Amino acid sequence: MSAEIISSLAADMLLILLPALYILSEKKKLPVALNALGFKKILPKALAKKTILLFAGLLAASVILVTVLSLLGISDLQNVQSSVAEMRLFPLFLCLVATRVVGEEVFFRGFLVQKIGLLGSTLVFALFHALYFSVAEIAGAFVLGLILAKTFQLNKNLYPNIIAHFAYNAAAIILFY
C-alpha cells in the first residue's frame, strides 16, 4: 500500500475520531456520543425512503450543476478523474470511498453542522475539496454539501446521508471510468 493511500486513510479516520473525541471529552459515554453525532436508530422503511430521496436529489443537483458549469465553459474535472484513476484495485477503491464518505459525513454533517451551522460546514466541505484543484469539484462539493447538510438538519440522522453519499460517489467514479 502506498504512502499516499495510507495518509488518505489516516486523514479519513481523523475525520471520524476528532468529533468522537470531542464529544467524549464532554464526559459522554460512547452510545451518547454516537447519538450526538447522528447515529440514531431508524426503521428500515424510513431509511430506504430518506436515502432514495436524498440520492435522487444529489443526482438531480449534479445534472443541473454540470449543465450550468458547461454553459459557463467550466469543465476542469480532469484533475478529479486523474485522482480517481489512481485507485485501480477494487477492494482498495471500496475501502477509500467507504472511509472517506463515513469520515466526511461524521465530521462535516454530524459534527460541524451542529457546531458552525449549515453554511459554515458547507463552506468548509467545499474548501476540503479544493485539494482536487478543480473549480467544478469545489462548486459541486458546495451544492451537494448543502443538500447533505440540510438533509442532516431535517433528519437528525447520518445513516441516510452515509448511504446516499456512498452511492453517489460510487456512481460518479463508475461514470469516470
Image (cartoon, rainbow, N blue to C red):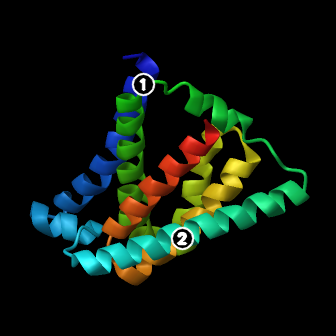
Residue at (29, 70) in percent of width and height: 38
Is 91 left or right of 147, judged from the image as shown? left
Mark 1, secondary structure of its residue: loop
Q: CA distance from mark 1 to mark 2?
A: 28 Å
Mark 2, secondary structure of its residue: helix
Query: What is the x, y in percent for residue 39?
Result: 24, 67
Residue at (19, 58) in percent of width and height: 25
Query: What is the x, y in percent for residue 138?
Result: 67, 52
10 lies above or below 26: above
Q: Residues within 10 Å of mark 1 (few under 14, many from 20)?
A: few
- The residue identified by callout 2 is 56
Image quadrant for the C terminus? top right
Image quadrant for the N terminus? top left
Q: Residues within 10 Å of mark 2 (few under 14, many from 20)?
A: some
- The residue identified by callout 1 is 89
Is 82 left or right of 16, judged from the image as shown? right
Given residues 59 and 23, the one toward you in this image is 59
Given residues 135 and 87, the one toward you in this image is 87
Given residues 113 and 116, the one toward you in this image is 113
